[in-house]
């Protein structure tokens, strides 16, 4: 199937996701036909469910139960970190592109109970109106880009700083 | 008035604001002629005052007194949250575009004393060189994007994550 | 030397850096020929060393020793703040462009011991898995954009908010 055979709305969504990926320091799979097929799945899911459900997983069809799998999913960045690609290989990083990470199937990172029962948000933190400064530990470490000061909270720093595009090794632990 | 009747610098500023809005997860009003008229007001104000004063409010003409009303104003995001549009309806969100929020006039959120006397910055926090880790509560809650780890401090999470474009419901309270 | 004389990969890298700069609220030097020459230096360094070493400084040629000088360097933003331009004048701000900052040579901000021995990362913070909420002061103040809530940790707020493009005077101290 050539790129010309994809519907115009699929090509348009691909273009948008590609631009947004770049702006945020992410990269779509450079295999254009493979990627267009995934984007077609996203567009189909958007029509069917009303949200861009991951095209490589089974949907419950209820937004709240699928929330963590709306693309980009909650597991993308951890998979990019460990495998150089997300579960679908829609998003990849430069290690994967350069072949420094093998192009193999990615294990499911979603917790088993979510696969069975659907996503379930953690209990909301008490909305006291008083932002928390207790001594309770933070749920994630906070990383700081040494170039521009960007802050984010995740297990590992991002591959690329979304603001200044500095690489992961320019981040330091901040909190 | 057709778009062709707007001066080239107005069209250029419109294009820039449109691109910057998209990059940050915001959306300009899709009514192009209405929006160009507002952008024309911004361009006029920039020439007159030296800053892009909100075209829908009265200016003091002193930057310090008008600071909170330089576009985008300090009240845009709270208005987008509550009404789906900013005070001018220059910035709107998808609920407003889809008609899930009524297209009505937005009440003035700026505190009355600022309307009368001009903006007045809160007393600066003591610049001790020692960033604060006191037990004083934070002035705003900190929200975390569960997809990419982006952090921001505001009353509510943003409609769209500026980094990965995930929607508001993918944010969690972090601090 | 006209722009046409630069190799296509240099022109392409220039275009990319220019777009990324704008997205993050930064500005490349508008003197296109001067800037292309610097970008050519970056492209040469990337071929030679495997990373985009600053074209205006001497390289050790070992990534770890040069890490703080990979462009954009760790000193860019402080130099933009103080002088309106980075060490190379590849990145400049609007004060510099408007001539409100003199176009003069920028002193080396890199600590002398790094110039002699190469970059040396600070001792990593203990990776206890427990993000730090101790009462130890934060290493940098945290700034908040009053328009969009963006947070960053740096000595001074950025010149332009990377998310909503509000100017520096719209930031407040947050932590």
Image (cartoon, coloured by chain):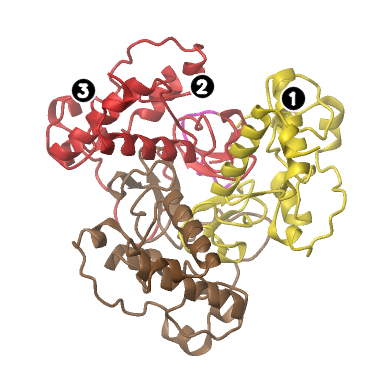
Chain colours: A yellow, B red, C brown
Q: Is residue A3 left or right of residue C136?
A: right
Where residue A172 is drawn, which disc sits there? Answer: none
Asked if the residues shown at circle 3 and circle 2 are in contact, with their CB atoms under 8 angstroms apart, the answer is no
Where residue B94 is drawn, which disc sits there? Answer: 2
Q: Is residue B84 left or right of residue C146?
A: right
Location of the N terminus of chain A (image quadrant) = top right
Q: Which residues are magenta?
A: A127-135
Where residue A45 is drawn, which disc sits there? Answer: 1
Q: CA distance from mark 3 to mark 1?
A: 47 Å
Residue A53 visible? The answer is yes
Of the numbered discs 3 and 2, the one sitting upstream in the chain is 2
On the same chain, marks 3 and 1? The answer is: no
Where residue B112 is drawn, which disc sits there? Answer: 3
How many numbered badges does the structure rendering display? 3
Q: Chain of mark 1?
A: A
Residue B4 location (% of width, % of height): 30, 27
B79 in magenta: no
A132 in magenta: yes
Residue C121 location (% of width, % of height): 56, 75
Q: Is residue B42 above or below residue B29?
A: below
Q: Residue at the spot x=79%, y=55% of the render?
A: A83
């Amino acid at each position: 199937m050539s790129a010309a055979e994809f519907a115009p709305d699929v090509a348009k969504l691909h273009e948008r996701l590609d631009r947004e990926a770049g702006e945020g320091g992410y990269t779509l799979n450079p295999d254009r036909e493979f990627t267009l097929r995934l984007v077609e799945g996203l567009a189909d899911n958007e029509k069917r469910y009303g949200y861009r459900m991951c095209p490589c997983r089974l949907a419950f069809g209820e937004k709240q139960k699928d929330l963590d799998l709306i693309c980009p999913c909650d597991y993308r960045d951890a998979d990019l970190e460990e495998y150089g690609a997300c579960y679908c290989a829609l998003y990849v990083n430069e290690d994967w592109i350069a072949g420094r990470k093998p192009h193999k199937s990615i294990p499911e990172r979603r917790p088993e109970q979510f696969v069975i029962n659907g996503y379930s948000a953690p209990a909301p933190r008490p909305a006291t109106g008083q932002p928390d400064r207790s001594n309770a530990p933070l749920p994630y470490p906070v990383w700081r880009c040494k170039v521009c000061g960007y802050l984010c909270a995740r297990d590992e720093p991002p591959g690329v700083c979304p603001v200044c595009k500095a690489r992961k090794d320019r981040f330091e632990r901040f909190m």
